[in-house]
Amino acid sequence: MAAKKAEQKALVLAGGGMLSAVAEDLVANGWYVVLPSRRYSPPAARQVESRAHRSRRGRTEAGRAVWVEAEWMRPRELARAADGALGGHADLLVAWVHEAYRRSVLGVVESLLAPGAPVVEVREGGWSDPVLTGRPTQGIVLGSVSERDSGRSLIQSEVVGGVAAAVARALDGHPSTVHTLGQAGRVAR
């Protein structure tokens, strides 16, 4: 992922740290990342801080991550908390929101995005039109079976790798696309 200037801001909606490695990568590349979620995850926060300090010794000026308390079932409160933490518009949205709350949450956070800010949206099971139409969207559909081994489910590193690749495509200005990670079906035993 290319280094970004410290002013770049990302909003990462991914629950209890499911995409913490993606947030860490953004921070290591100079992004200011806002992470709204229900539960504070101290180990993930330490990893972000630790990686940021290591990065400062290298070539890239590190960014930082800020957690704000928020719940999917209260989308307006989530948007207010994220808005306060962002202190301006987000240049990127990465969202993995439970299907029951996806439309309401993404609908209210759209006003927090800069004009033209790309979206990376992760979904399980299938894809329909994006909620945030008119924005370049990199869609990720998660299958239930690994492409590498039909005897197991997708693992965290496969999901993180696929989402990180989608973030890179989004930041490189690629047009909207949908990619599937894994395969539909049951794990073969």
Image (cartoon, rainbow, N blue to C red):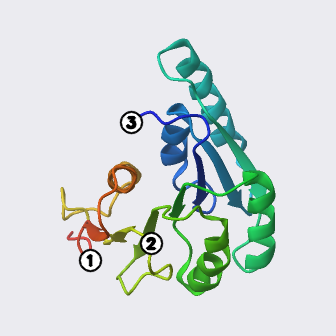
Residue hosting label 1: 186
> Please, what is the three-letter code of the amino acid marked with disc 3?
Ala
Q: How many marks?
A: 3
User: Relative to the observer, which residue lies in front, 75 or 155?
Assistant: 75
Left or right for 110, reference 122 = right
Q: Which mark is residue 46?
A: none
Is residue 40 at least partly visible in the picture?
A: no
Q: Is residue 53 left or right of residue 28?
A: right
Residue at 39% over, 68% down: 136
Q: Tell me the mark number nearer the camera, choosing from 1 and 2.
A: 2
- Classify 3 as above or below 157: above
Measured as percent of width and height from the top left, residue 77 is found at 81, 73
The numbered disc on residue 135 is 2
Task: State which tag comes first along the sequence, 3 or 2.
Answer: 3
Reading the image, the residue beneath label 3 is 2
Work out which quarter of the rendered image holds the C terminus and state it: bottom left
Q: From this view, report whether residue 126 is shown above or below residue 137.
A: below
In this view of the protein, which residue sits in the foreground, 49 or 104?
104
Q: Separation of disc 3 and disc 2 at Cα?
A: 21 Å
Query: Mark 2: which amino acid?
Result: Arg
96 on left or right of 171: right
Query: Dot 1: what SS?
Result: loop
Image location of residue 127, percent across then percent down: 35, 82
Q: Residues within 10 Å of mark 1 (few under 14, many from 20)?
A: some
Are circles 1 and 2 on residues that touch, CB within 8 Å?
no
Quadrant in the picture for residue 8: top right
